[in-house]
Amino acid sequence: MTDLLTFSPEVASALADKKPVLAFESTIISHGMPYPRNAETAREAERIARTAGAVPATIAVLDGRIVVGLTEPQLERLATEKDVLKVSRRDMAWALAARRMGATTVSATMLAARLAGISVFATGGIGGVHMGVEDTFDISADLTELASTSVMVVSAGAKAILDLPRTLEVLETLGVPVVGFGASEFPAFYSRSSGLNLSLRVDTPAEAASLLQAQRALGLPQGILVANPVPQEWEIPRKTMERWIDQALQDLSTRGVTGKAVTPFLLSRIVELSGGKSLETNVKLFHNNVRLGSAIAVELSRMP
């Protein structure tokens, strides 16, 4: 794998010394929000991780390599260039072979993190089963990645634009533990509550780290999804979100958007409908997940 992976000096040193490292995706930079907010959000996430005692490792595909730990010029390049490929697991080999610049999704970041030896990954929200799946068969590769890649993913649940009950059903079928952090209900990304109960719960970063150790000791291939609710002061009430999501879904159908463009379109439309409030909540919940992910990585590094 040394022929495909490039580590920043900071990340390489941390991994060699078995210090805590926290992985980040890069689609949040290239496809998640406008410039310069995308770059500011990514830099703040890295600052939060370092303050919490973890080394940040933002992952992307650049010049035929999987880069683990972006330099400042690389981060700025991803934040500003327009023709950045959205790289899922399916696209990883092609992006490397074609030497394309690519921003990694949850599934591709999990794959790269495992190859790099990083156990914990913080993101905003995972993908899942899309509304109208019975017609489109649109199911995110994030779910099958969680079924086969042993990385702990800290998120505010799945993105609220998705069919959350079906997403949880698929994760259960795939044997993926979905664990509420300090909560017994699955969060709905922008909102703390989805009305969907969880049977698994942890209340401290140490408990989450112990769970990952036990999962690996059993030889189970699945990752673990830690569902961390958005802080109460930043949440958007479910009923309000449902109105905006319904409108965004109607606009999606009217404009005929399909494929990889669906999620960016819906999130962007919701930003417009919410007057920017959803973007603020997105940033806050992501940084909240970074704090928790960093704490879990630190606890994991202390364990035998």
Image (tube, rainbow, N blue to C red):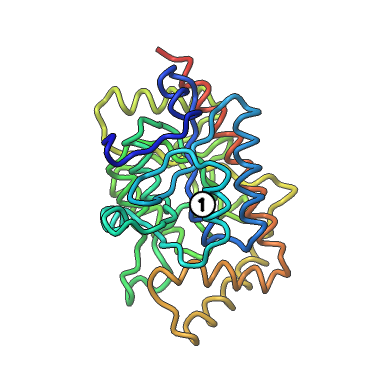
The answer, for residue 199, to whether it is visible in the render is no
Q: Quadrant of residue 276?
A: bottom right
Front-lying residue, 16 or 191: 16
The answer, for residue 171, to whether it is visible in the render is yes
Residue occupying the point 44% across, 15% down: 303
Could you say where residue 80 lies in the image, as x and y percent from the top left? 57, 60
Front-lying residue, 191 or 253: 253
Disc 1 designates what residue?
125
177 lies left or right of 197: left
Front-lying residue, 275 or 16: 16
Please state, as top left, top right, bottom left or bottom right, where the N terminus lies in the image: top left
173 lies left or right of 113: left
Residue occupying the point 58% across, 34% down: 292
> Above or below — where is 30 with respect to 297?
below
7 lies left or right of 192: left
Q: Residues within 10 Å of mark 1 (few under 14, many from 20)?
A: many
Front-lying residue, 28 or 289: 28
Could you say where residue 40 lies in the image, as x and y percent from the top left? 66, 50
View extreme (top): residue: 304
> Above or below — where is 164 with respect to 10?
below
